[in-house]
Amino acid sequence: MRLYCDTAALASACQNVSHAASTKTAIPAIEGILLVAKDQTLYLTGYDLEMGITTTISANVEEEGALVINAHMFSETLRKLPADVVSIDSDSRNIASIRSGAFSSTLIGISAEEYPELPAVMGGYPVEIEQTLLKDMIRKTIFSVAAKDSKIVHTGIRFEVRENHLRLIAVDGVRLAIRNEEIAYEGEDLTFVVPAKTLSEVIKLMSDEEEPIRIGVGKRHIEINVGNYGIISRLLDGEFLKYESAIPDSAKTVITADTRQLMDCVDRTSLIITDKIKSPIKCTFEDNEIQMSCISSLGTAQDRMECKIEGEGLTIGFNNKYMLDALRNCETDEVRILLSGAIRPILIVPHSGDSFLFLILPVRLKNEDKGEAR
């Protein structure tokens, strides 16, 4: 293989593709990036057996060929090259010579024949979604994905695609996030769960343009095309939480509050809470006012703000981080908080419509009735 190409273009492509390369594995080949040079194009692939990222860049190919180069070493080398053009020349021993300006280096590669083949999404159902919309929906649910769960399926986001409608759901055992939007889709109903790791890489590759991205959904894998990149990922199997039954169907107390003010109020009351020193925030809703307080080994904090309250007054405890995560992902100036009891889930929804729903399980306060069950 012998070629030369633009250094910046190759460095950017390698940086993005390397996110799919494995970092801890007994298979050296998948710690690398597969380079295939042909037809004046350089094809790049990273694949860790669960997720693959592919892309292409223009190159002056003098001799076609293929080679696997360690992703970390190759990306770091390209990032520090001094000239605008880089040349790559590999021999029969799979040793790659890299030159740029006065710099030269050799990296020991691996035969392309040892690189695993990416799965093909055959006969997948196509779904097209605007980049900006999908990016927003993923960002506003992914924070609720379980980092570790006995059910692997909860480490991903559930997609529900129905006629002209898309819903994303994430759950981690103590909270739930739902985003709803209308989309142009007229195919059959689809339900699938995509690993959070895959979606984290997808949103890194997305731009802020209205250009739609195409998703192909197969039985076991999904293919997402973003600009010049293709992402292939396995789907997660398993029974996802029956989340709809976890959402209370009525509320005894409905609070309407300014989102920014409420977030600031929670944030200030959280100043005496740290990663090591945790304590719930006690919140009382009554007389059109929210009263917050917190006690920890660092001291005390109290705050209050005006709001509109319909129904019964109520005192409830909650985790400050979970509440702040939810409020930061509300896209409306005002939110409604729906409460059906001191030990029942807290719901946060928009003032109107159903574009999002965040559910947080409350924290039992010490003076609560010990006979009540959580």
Image (cartoon, rainbow, N blue to C red):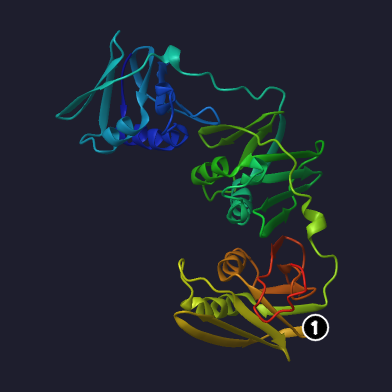
Give the total number of marks visible in the rendering: 1
Q: Secondary structure at mark 1?
A: strand
70 on left or right of 148: left
Instruction: Determine which quarter of the picture holds residue 72.
Output: top left
Name the residue rendered at 49%, 45% in the picture.
Answer: 204
Q: Position of residue 315 (x, y in %)?
A: 71, 82
Along the viewing direction, whichever of 372 and 333 lies nearer the viewer: 372
- The residue under label 1 is which amino acid type? Glu
* Residue most extreme to the front: 371
188 on left or right of 64: right
181 on left or right of 96: right
* Residue most extreme to the bottom: 287
Quarter of the figure that contains the C terminus? bottom right
Along the viewing direction, whichever of 194 and 331 lies nearer the viewer: 194
Along the viewing direction, whichever of 238 and 49 lies nearer the viewer: 238
Task: Report the residue marked by disc 1.
Answer: 310
Q: Is the residue 129 above or below the residue 330 in the image?
A: above
Instruction: Determine which quarter of the picture holds residue 81.
Output: top left
